[in-house]
Structures are given as C-alpha cells and as structure tokens.
Amino acid sequence: MAYDPNNIFAKILRGEIPCNKVYEDEFALAFHDINPQAPVHVLVIPKGEYISMADFTKSAPAELVTGFMRAVGAVADQLGLVEPGYRTLANAGDNAHQEVPHLHIHIFGGAPLGPMLDKRFSG
Ligand code: AMP
C-alpha cells in the first residue's frame, strides 16, 4: 500500500490543519487525541511518510527510528506519566482498526487503564 499524503496526520505535519501540540522535535510531533479515551490521550507521530510500525522500522533511517522512539519516552516523561504508569499502543491495518494511515503511537494515562485487550481473547 502506498502512503497517502492527504491523510489527516500528514496535513497536521504540514501545518494545514491545527493540533493541540504537546511536544515537537526534528523527529516527531505529539498532540492530544481529538477523541480522548483516557484522562491523558496523546498521539506521537514520526516526521516522515510511514504508514505503520512495520513500514517505519523497515524503511526509515536509523536516526529517525531512534529519535522517534526517544520522543515517545520524552512525551511520557513530560506528561508526568512515568511514575504512575501509562500504556502505549500502535494500531496497524484492518484487524486493529487503524483509522489514520500514518504511523502513530497512542499514549494513554492519567488513571488505572483496565485490561490490555478485549476479554474475548484471555484465558
Ligand atoms: P487509530 O484508530 O489508531 O488510527 O487512531 C486514530 C486516532 O486519531 C483516533 O484516536 C482519533 O480520535 C484520532 N484523530 C483523528 N483525527 C484527529 C485530529 N485531527 N487531531 C487529533 N486526533 C485525531
């Protein structure tokens, strides 16, 4: 699948639509999710045209992979989530209901988050 440069996160990266920014560096941008599913719900996206984690880790320069992952950690730290705990999640493809085809890591926190996955799959 080819990267769609008109996806909403590409538009945010180009500054064509606004976001509620929490962090930015040369590798990544982080902003509040428009439809939060936890008291803190932030998205971290890499600066580059990558659809998913598989695409990103296969194609992105090592400096960007490192910088992006460091940004995820820095955002969790900046938001005060490290001590109380938090969850990261990256949906990829149809089975995971990925809505926006630009790699994004969700950061959830601010309260106990409950089970990791749908109870249908636990023993
Ligand atoms: P996913 O299902 O993993 O692709 O998640 C996409 C996320 O992007 C959802 O949690 C949406 O609420 C969020 N989202 C969609 N549009 C925007 C936007 N303009 N600004 C911030 N978050 C958005």
Image (tube, rainbow, N blue to C red):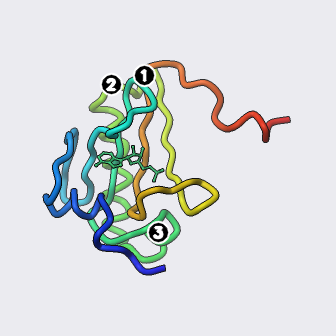
**Mark 2: secondary structure:** loop
**Alpha carbon separation for disc pair 1 and 3:** 28 Å
| Circle 2 residues within 10 Å: few <14, some 14–19, many ≥20 | some
Q: Position of residue 35 (x, y in %)?
A: 37, 37
Give the mark nearer the N terminus: 3 vs 2.
3
Residue reaching furthest to the left: 15
Identify which amino acid the numbered label 3 is placed on. Thr
- Residue at horizontal 19 percent and vertical 53 percent from the top: 25
Residue 57 image label: 3
Relative vertical location of residue 29 with respect to residue 60 in this rendering, above or below: above
Q: Amino acid at mark 2?
A: Gly
- Residue 73 x, y percent position in the rendering: 37, 42
The mark found on residue 83 in the picture is: 1
Q: CA distance from mark 3 to mark 2?
A: 27 Å
Residue at 14%, 60% in the rendered image: 16
**Tags 1 and 2 touching, CB below 8 Å:** yes
Mark nearest the camera among 1 and 3 is 3
Q: Is the residue marked by circle 1 packed among few (<14), some (14-19), or many (20+) residues within 10 Å?
A: few
Q: Is residue 1 shown above or below 85?
A: below
Looking at the rendered structure, the kind of residue marked 1 is: Glu
Helix, strand or loop status at disc 3: helix
Residue that label 2 marks:
80
Quarter in which the C terminus is drawn = top right
Q: Residue furthest right?
A: 123
Which element type, helix, strand or loop, lies under badge 1? loop
Q: Residue at x 29, y 73 (%)?
A: 5
Residue at point 59% right, 54% down? 96
Of the numbered discs 1 and 3, the one sitting upstream in the chain is 3
Q: Residues within 10 Å of mark 3 (few under 14, many from 20)?
A: some
Q: Is residue 53 above or below residue 37?
A: below
Image x and y of residue 1, in percent = 49, 79
